[in-house]
Image (spheres, rainbow, N blue to C red):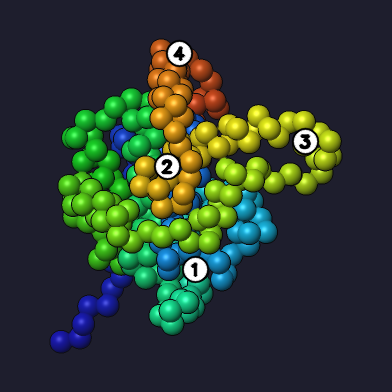
Amino acid sequence: MAANLSPEPEPTPLGPGSLTWRYFGDTRILLMGPCAAVLQNMLPALGQGVLDHSVFFAETFARLRRSAGPILNTVYGGPDAAATGRTVRDYHRDIKGTMPDGGRYHALDPETYYWAHATFLDTMIRGTETFIRPLDEDEKRRIYAESKTWFRMYGVSDRAMPDDWETFQAYWKRMLEEEIVPHKTARYGVGYVTKGLPAPPRVPAPVWRAVSPPLNAVARFLTVGGMPPRVREVLGLPWSRADERRYRRFAAAVRRLNAVWPVLPEAVRYLPQARTAFARARRDRG
């Protein structure tokens, strides 16, 4: 009998009832800084792929902006989410090469690709608990189940994906303790913590010298504060007890905004991809 070669059906996209919809596009998650991107580049294979194939060093912030939209649309794209996910996957087909030790890497290796996804999940959960509200274990299990649907939008093998929230926590602990390294791309991504932000094009040097000190202080505070302690340790990022106290006070102040947050304009509260999805859902409800 001939084998059944019909393609697998597309996964059902996440929708307005999901906790991921509620939190991933919340602008308060941006206060986590570039945590996900830095964590991604700490996996040797992923960091090497960025080093060999990306314009990351020449156009760091432009690259981050270009990457963010398609990732958000794998969550908020509705009927187009799976197509967007496959497009994101296909960006990575030719990202492959040789590691310094002679081993081979490929961006679509399931373990490598899943790590990138896991960093977004971790940033969303920690960002929600830090700046929005605590999540109970049932909510975390629910978000993790949603993250499995989200990952399947990419059309990449899910063999590296943990079965449940409890297994994911063990996976995450192992990755932080045993797998991440201070890769050159990760160190570059947090270099402004000690060296300062690069001057934007077309900003006169005297103006930048005047405005950059407070901007650098804020960037350092959010970047280092948003990192897990193990990541700070591996990257050698300075963070004192006084820094931690200030960060906790800042986070508590942001959480107090919950009292007025719902009445602020949606354009303040959510990223554009989320707002588009919310508008589509309202139209669909009639």
The disc, 2 or 1, on the residue closer to the chain's N-terminal end is 1
The disc, 3 or 4, on the residue closer to the chain's N-terminal end is 3
Compare residues 271 and 122 and report the one nearer the observer: 122
Q: Quadrant of the C terminus?
A: top left
Q: Which mark is residue 274?
A: none
Whether residue 54 is visible here, answered yes or no, is: yes
Label 1: which secondary element: helix
**Residue linked to disc 2:** 227
Label 2: which secondary element: loop
Among the 4 quarters of the image, the one containing residue 158: bottom left
For the point 54% across and 25% down, which residue is it? 268
Q: Number of marks in the image?
A: 4
- Vertical arrangement, residue 20 with respect to residue 79, above or below: above
The disc, 1 or 4, on the residue closer to the chain's N-terminal end is 1
Label 4: which secondary element: loop
Q: Residues within 10 Å of mark 1 (few under 14, many from 20)?
A: many
**Residue linked to disc 3:** 209
Residue 137 is situated, as x and y percent measured from the top left of the image, at: 19, 35
Q: Residues within 10 Å of mark 4 (few under 14, many from 20)?
A: few
